[in-house]
Image: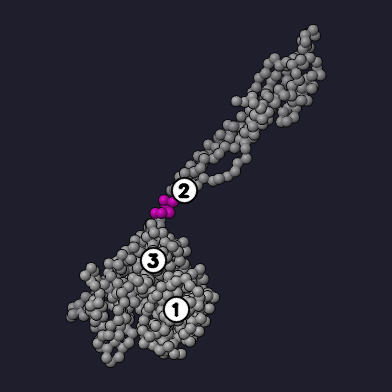
Amino acid sequence: MLKELLRGGITGGIAGARVRDCLFAQWTPASCRYVLARRGNPFPTILAADRFEPDPERPVAAQLRERVAATGARCRHAVLVLPRTELEFSTHHLPPATGDELPELVRNAAAAELDESSGTYSSDFLITHQDYSGCDTLVFSMRDERIRDHVGAFESAGFKVAAVTFRGFGASELVERAHGYPASTSMAVLMDDVTIEFAVVDEGKPILFRTIPCAEEDERVRAERVGNEIRRTLALAHAGDDSSVSIYLIGASDDSDALANLLTEQTSLPTATIHPFSYCAEDSESQVPSECAALVGVACAWNRTAIPIDLLHPRRPPVKPGPWRRAVLWGGVAAAVLIALGAMAWKDAADESAAIAERRNEFKQLGARSRRALELRDLVESVDAWRRDEIAWLDRIRELSEQLPDGEQLVIRRMSMSTGSDGNGVIDLAVQVSAPGVVADLEDAIRGRGHSVSSKRVSESDEKAKLPWVFETRVALKADSPAELPIPEMAGEEPKSESREPARGDAEVAKHDNQRGGDRP
């Protein structure tokens, strides 16, 4: 138990059960696939699964961080799932050795075949067969510099890399989840738009992985090609092609079922289809389920802390403690636990302080914006109050002149204009008319349309004059409704595109222009 804690919980490996959410990612320059999973019992929950074409101008890890944030999950851990082209494979038959001695033997055997002149490699291994004569191992190696580049890119995007593993284990894990491993040989076939992968499992142990390119071709042609590769792979694995071998095609569409039937015809071996999302706590349907199947399988292995290969934390021979080193080791473990707990508490406190500071800053910004809004509202109200007393006198005089009789019946000797306390306009006129009846006609013509009129002091000044009758009249005008003014946008807000009806003053000016025709320049 202590070894598992040291390997996973403290050193950051995949066995730390406290990790709740984890991102599983595989990418190439042309395509990036990811699965976001949450721990569950007995199956993980798939929160998101998708594929996208990465922007070559930006780091892939940063684009994955944006997509994780869009789901609302707080995921800080990632498992990097690498394709066959990123790794070096080798097989070795080693003499009998204990579990502590085997990692060193594997390291030396792999180093003899790797070119370490330009850099060192990290290697992890599987035991494919073991008996009294020794054991057969399948070794996975990757240059340390390449691992550091991948880990550094994801850590720069805010992820903590929990493991670096091989994508082929996802298919074999799904087969185990779906049917369990019988004593006979099983083969998983996983196809996507780029490659076709084969994983051979014998008595629960992956023993062989192969990858071939995938091409666009007719279904029967593809089935024939895959069937030939199945026979070739079984021959390489020294397995028979009788009924003891089962073929499992990873897929979730009608095309997968049709291809499985064709493979049965081509190989005479029973072929079953496995839906990659059927063995999770939630069936999160994806647009590209087959292409995310390997990642789902790795997530299932992570859920039970059983990813078989981790190049970030490969198996190494244990350091033999001396007489005093045992006490130092236990003291170091206790100190590491205390430091880890203290770091977690400090990180939580720092996160809370940062969140409080962020909320305080938002509050200050909102306060400044609200004060600015109140100032603008007071300014608008002041302008509206001032404009309520605004009267278009020229328009009123023009309307009044259109209602007056001609110059032979009426002459205006004096005219004054003012604004009353209620905001309405008043026009006082001193008028000479040809007959008293013209006064009544004048009042009838002006009254209405928002006007009221009253006349007084009607008298005859000179009966021999052309316009002998003199009187004074008052015309009360209702104030115009002020035109709406555009409200200035607040700083930092997006401008709102709203359709505004023409103001009343604008409409009247346009009407006046149409009536005057070409008089206005």
- Which disc is residue 225 wearing? 1
Relative depth, front residue between 499 and 256? 256
Q: In the picture shown, does residue 366 fall above or below 506? A: below
Secondary structure type for disc 3: loop
Residue density around tag 3, few if under 14, some if 14–19, many if 20 or more, within 10 Å: few
Secondary structure type for disc 1: helix
Say whether disc 2 or disc 3 marks the residue closer to the N-terminus. Answer: 3
Disc 1 marks a residue whose amino acid type is: Arg
Image-based side of 263 in relation to 516, left or right: left
| Residue at point 31%, 88% (across, down) | 130
**Which residues are drawn in magenta?**
357-363
Relative depth, front residue between 489 and 153? 153
| Residue at point 25%, 88% (across, down) | 96
Say whether disc 2 or disc 1 marks the residue closer to the N-terminus. Answer: 1
- Which disc is residue 28 wearing? 3
Q: Quadrant of residue 74?
A: bottom left
Spatial separation of the CA atoms under disc 1 and disc 3: 25 Å
Residue 417 spot, x, y in % from top left: 65, 22
Q: Nearer the viewer, mark 1 or mark 3?
A: 1
Q: Nearer the viewer, mark 2 or mark 1?
A: 1
Image-based side of 242 in relation to 451, left or right: left
Q: Is residue 276 visible?
A: yes
Disc 3 marks a residue whose amino acid type is: Thr
